[in-house]
Image (tube, rainbow, N blue to C red):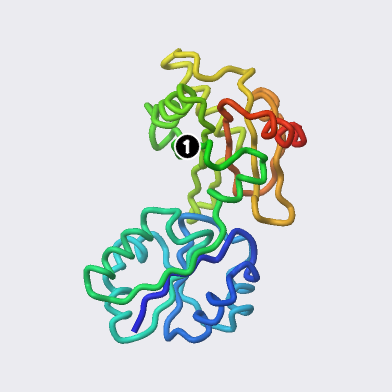
Amino acid sequence: MTLYIIGLGLNGPEDITVKGLELVKSCDEVYLERYTSLLQCSFHDLAKFYDREITLADRNTSEQGMEKIVAQAKTENVAFLVIGDPFSATTHTALFKIAKDEGVKVDVIHNASILTAIGQTGLQLYKFGKTTSIPFLDDFPQLETPYRILQQNQKIGAHTLLLLDIKVEQERFMTVKQAIEVMEDIESRVSENVISDDTFAIGCARLGCSDFKIISGTLKQLKEVDFGKPLHSLIIPGKMHFSEEEIVDMWK
């Protein structure tokens, strides 16, 4: 018996790999993790395409209920579906470890994630530094972490990917504008000149989807852009090679 951790990609039900789809159809139980990212299709459409009954795994199911999923995989083939790629969130690494510790066979089916899709901006992936998240300030009013990581990346000329907070259960998704405002709030408190209105950045929305949006410009300019529905992300480039600049300029 096996626990299959299967990446779904970034768009609709068709983005699953052929191997992943075959496993979803053959497994005894199928779970969908839905709190670390957002489906770009309805749950109903996903289940219909896969022709399977799917159990939604919320934050409690995924984090506190991992032992139950692993125990089930000792006697049945279980599929755990993850939007994007399985190892782009720490929760799924924990599930993998628990299963391994319990002697359960695990097979991981990879797929596209935001960490690879950002290459469409024209920035070279190996020139990115640490990736960080920007949470809503009402949860962390004294937040500094994304600011500090950006600062560290800037010192070595590396690009910075800022992943924006989502609260799926509350249908609350941070926008590019809100992310910039959070970083501005930190700048106003610490005053170390890491960002300003003129800081060059790239705003992204729905990467991997047909209606994706990529806009480059200053932070002041990006705050005025309507990036549309989620998910959004923000990139602050470091030192760019001329070949990167040529592509990035296309998004102005």
Q: Residue at x 52, y 22 (%)?
A: 184
Query: Relative to 5, is 146 above or below?
Result: above
Quadrant location of residue 220? top right
Mark 1: few/some/many CA within 10 Å (<14, 14-19, 20+): many
Q: Residue at x 55, y 66 (%)?
A: 8
Q: Amino acid at mark 1?
A: Ile
Q: Is residue 217 left or right of residue 75?
A: right
Q: Nearer the viewer, residue 149 or 170?
A: 149
Q: Position of residue 96 (x, y in %)?
A: 33, 65
Query: Relative to 85, is 144 above or below?
Result: above
Q: Residue at x 35, y 73 (%)?
A: 106
Q: Position of residue 14 (x, y in %)?
A: 65, 70
Mark yes or no: residue 120 visible: yes
Q: Nearer the viewer, residue 95 or 159?
A: 159
Quadrant location of residue 138? top left
Mark yes or no: residue 223 visible: no
**Which residue is identified by label 1?**
134
Q: Say which quadrant the N terminus sits in.
A: bottom left
Q: Nearer the viewer, residue 84 or 165?
A: 84
Q: Is residue 199 left or right of residue 34?
A: right
Query: Relative to 222, is 32 above or below?
Result: below
Q: Secondary structure at mark 1?
A: strand
Q: Position of residue 126 (x, y in %)?
A: 52, 41
Q: Residue at x 73, y 56 (%)?
A: 210
Q: Is residue 201 left or right of residue 224?
A: left
Q: Say which quadrant the C terminus sits in.
A: top right
Q: How many discs appear?
A: 1
Q: Position of residue 244 (x, y in %)?
A: 67, 34
